[in-house]
């Protein structure tokens, strides 16, 4: 069951925090080696490797012509989706698009002294590869969250990779793609899909940027191909921290911890509270509510391994713990929620109050649910339009300005031992 400790128990607290941090795939050298071998095979053998891995990992016998999913197949499977799910998808797409349209960046230019013109041109990446996981982690909501900002950014070509079984098991994923008018889809999953998108095969095109969630093999593959292509992040297992005081409802807190824990056995759900009474009520609520849920086995393992309830002295201590963990999701159910949030420097997304469970962000609110995990909120942000855009700096000097600055440029170049750089500025003064 979930561990309940006081922040005064320094050794136990340190061990809990370290256990949560260690879920990061970057620590797993054996995993990285295994994934590197898969990437090498896809680079070497192309489609043949994808077909072999489909048989080995997915139990599917594919022919090369079956690697691409036809638009007809997508639409046929999408037609099986219940009207209530379709309406919810359309509402989610509308809200997410409205949010991301506010993120649009514009090219700009400024005029400086003596005929100098400086600027920045904003352009979209040409081809984006979106990974959609299969199995229990196949979410139509993630399709929406990855496709919409790419479309708002103006990406020319959106290419989706997903395991061969995805659409038969999760027709709502096909429905999301059809609603978004994305029809270039390949039946390739796992680390091999990331390799195919990064390097290209006979069938799967090479892309410029890869986004989308996945298991630890997908996360490791994204880490290894970064630099050949851009990526959104090296996503680890999902996580939530809930900050609560004695005004919070134990039933709400418990339900949100359970919602996070059902993602996977390595998901992390943590309560940080100033109220010992609330902490003990939440423990009881967890036991009561858990028995009603379908993924109880996953939840039990998640809470036992990576869950925690930490009783702190005050909100200053609570905020310090949050900033140390830098969680993907932060919920605040307490008095003065805005004041508490103002002291948080590191969180992927913040959810305020009793009536904003993290699930509203997963599905419908509008802000993107692709967020930094495993402490990456210390230096990165949620997925957005800017992730699918590039900035190209522009510079133009008039002859008079180069004449005025050439000797300064040369001085700096010579200080770095780069006399050809210095000469390239000074040569333009000759004969002028």
Image (tube, rainbow, N blue to C red):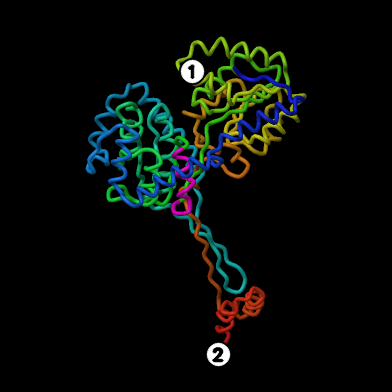
Q: Quadrant of the N terminus?
A: top right
Would residue 387 be counted in the magenta stretch? no
Highlighted magenta segment, given as a residue range: 217-229
x 58%, y 21%: residue: 304
Mark 2 lies on residue: 431
Closer to us: 247 or 196:
196
Would residue 226 be counted in the magenta stretch? yes
x 58%, y 24%: residue: 305
Q: Is residue 140 left or right of residue 429?
A: left
Foreground mark, 1 or 2, reads 1
Mark 1 lies on residue: 297
At label 1, counting other C-alpha atoms closer than 10 Å, the crowd grade (few under 14, some 14-19, many 20 or more) is some
Q: Is residue 158 left or right of residue 386?
A: left
Q: Position of residue 193 (x, y in %)?
A: 37, 42
**Is 56 rendered above or below residue 249?**
below
Q: Position of residue 272 (x, y in %)?
A: 68, 24
At label 2, counting other C-alpha atoms closer than 10 Å, the crowd grade (few under 14, some 14-19, many 20 or more) is few
Residue 76 visible to an observer of this rendering: yes
Closer to us: 245 or 304:
304
Q: Earlier in the sequence, mark 1 or mark 2?
A: 1
């Amino acid at each position: 069951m979930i561990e309940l400790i006081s922040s005064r128990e320094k050794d136990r607290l340190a061990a809990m925090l370290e256990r949560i941090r260690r879920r990061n795939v970057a620590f797993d050298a054996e995993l990285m080696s295994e994934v590197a071998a898969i990437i090498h095979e896809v680079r070497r053998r192309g489609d043949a490797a994808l077909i072999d891995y489909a048989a080995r990992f997915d139990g599917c016998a594919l022919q090369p012509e079956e690697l691409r999913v036809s638009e007809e197949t997508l639409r046929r499977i999408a037609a099986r989706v219940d009207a209530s799910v379709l309406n919810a998808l359309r509402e989610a797409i509308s809200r997410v698009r409205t949010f991301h349209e506010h993120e649009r960046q514009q090219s700009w230019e400024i005029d400086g002294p003596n005929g100098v013109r400086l600027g920045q041109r904003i352009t979209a990446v040409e081809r984006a590869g979106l990974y959609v996981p299969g199995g229990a982690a196949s979410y139509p909501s993630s399709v929406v969250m990855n496709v919409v900002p790419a479309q708002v950014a103006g990406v020319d070509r959106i290419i989706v990779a997903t395991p061969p079984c995805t659409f038969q098991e999760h027709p709502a994923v096909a429905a999301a793609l059809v609603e978004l008018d994305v029809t270039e889809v390949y039946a390739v999953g796992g680390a091999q899909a990331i390799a195919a998108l990064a390097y290209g095969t006979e069938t799967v095109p090479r892309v410029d940027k890869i986004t989308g969630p996945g298991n630890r093999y997908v996360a490791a593959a994204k880490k290894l191909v970064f630099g050949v292509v851009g990526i959104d992040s090296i996503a680890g297992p999902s996580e939530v921290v809930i900050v609560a005081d004695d005004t919070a409802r134990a039933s709400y807190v418990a339900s949100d911890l359970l919602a996070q824990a059902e993602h996977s056995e390595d998901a992390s759900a943590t309560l940080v509270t100033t109220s010992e009474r609330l902490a003990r009520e939440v423990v009881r609520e967890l036991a009561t509510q858990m028995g009603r849920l379908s993924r109880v086995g996953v939840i039990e393992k998640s809470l036992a391994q990576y869950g925690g309830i930490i009783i702190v002295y005050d909100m200053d201590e609570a905020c310090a713990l949050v900033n140390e963990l830098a969680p993907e999701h932060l919920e605040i159910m307490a008095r003065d929620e805005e004041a508490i949030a103002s002291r948080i420097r590191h969180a992927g997304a913040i959810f305020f109050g009793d009536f904003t469970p993290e699930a509203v962000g997963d599905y419908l609110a509008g802000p993107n649910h692709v967020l930094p995990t495993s402490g990456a909120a210390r230096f990165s942000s949620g997925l957005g339009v800017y992730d699918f855009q590039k900035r190209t700096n522009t510079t133009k000097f008039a002859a008079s300005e180069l004449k005025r600055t050439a000797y300064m440029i040369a001085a700096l170049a010579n200080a770095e031992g780069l006399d050809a750089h210095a000469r390239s500025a000074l040569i333009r003064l000759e004969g002028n």
